[in-house]
Image (spheres, grey):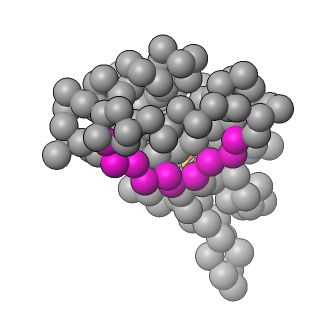
Amino acid sequence: MYSKILILYFPPVVAQNAVVCYLTKKFDLIFNILGARVSNKKDGYMVLELRGTKSNYQKGVSFLKDQGVRVSTAEQEIWRDMEKCTHCGACTAVCPTGALSIKRPEMEVIFDQEKCSVCELCIFTCPTRAMGLYSKNTDEMMV
Ligand code: SF4
Ligand code: SF4
């Protein structure tokens, strides 16, 4: 069984169609939605774990791309610059997987990289630019 976490970005016109359901119907794939924000008026995203045979997985991903969905995989890693982090908690409100959470009563923001799906939402939410995207291959900061 092949399994991968994917981040799907839907432009508004695609968000009106239930394209993800076809992954099961057409390609016998099992999906587990880890987080989502989809609206038929705005663009949206979905973080999901996709499981099935490798061949069906590849066909399913091609199908999504053909439908206009931008598909990205977790080939990069998210890192937090602790010197920049003020523990404001803003990133915990957008993190769909619970990788960022608030430890109470200390009110300290914890980052569990094992849970991170690399959806990048925290990068654009963080007011101090403490969250960054790095290439696993080169260790270069990308965003
Ligand atoms: S949003 Fe940025 S500064 Fe605030 S807790 Fe998250 S990483 Fe730290
Ligand atoms: S990229 Fe940021 S918001 Fe997305 S899962 Fe990882 S820690 Fe959470």
Residue 128 visible within the image:
no
Q: Which quadrant would residue 92 be assigned to in this image?
A: bottom right
**Percent coordinates x, y for residue 68 in the rendering:** 57, 17
**Percent coordinates x, y for residue 12 in the rendering:** 74, 26
Q: Which quadrant would residue 56 be assigned to in this image?
A: top left
State which quarter of the image contains the C terminus: top right
Task: Check residue 32 for magenta coloring.
Answer: yes
In front of the other: 91 or 74: 74
Image point (61%, 66%), residue name = 101
- Residue furthest to the front in view is 25
- Residue furthest to the right in view is 41
**Percent coordinates x, y for residue 19 in the rendering:** 53, 32
| Relative vertical location of residue 7 with respect to residue 51 in this rendering, above or below | above
Task: Check residue 56 for magenta coloring.
Answer: no
Residue stretch in magenta: 29-38
Image point (70%, 32%), residue name = 16
In front of the other: 66 or 116: 66
Image point (43%, 53%), residue name = 32
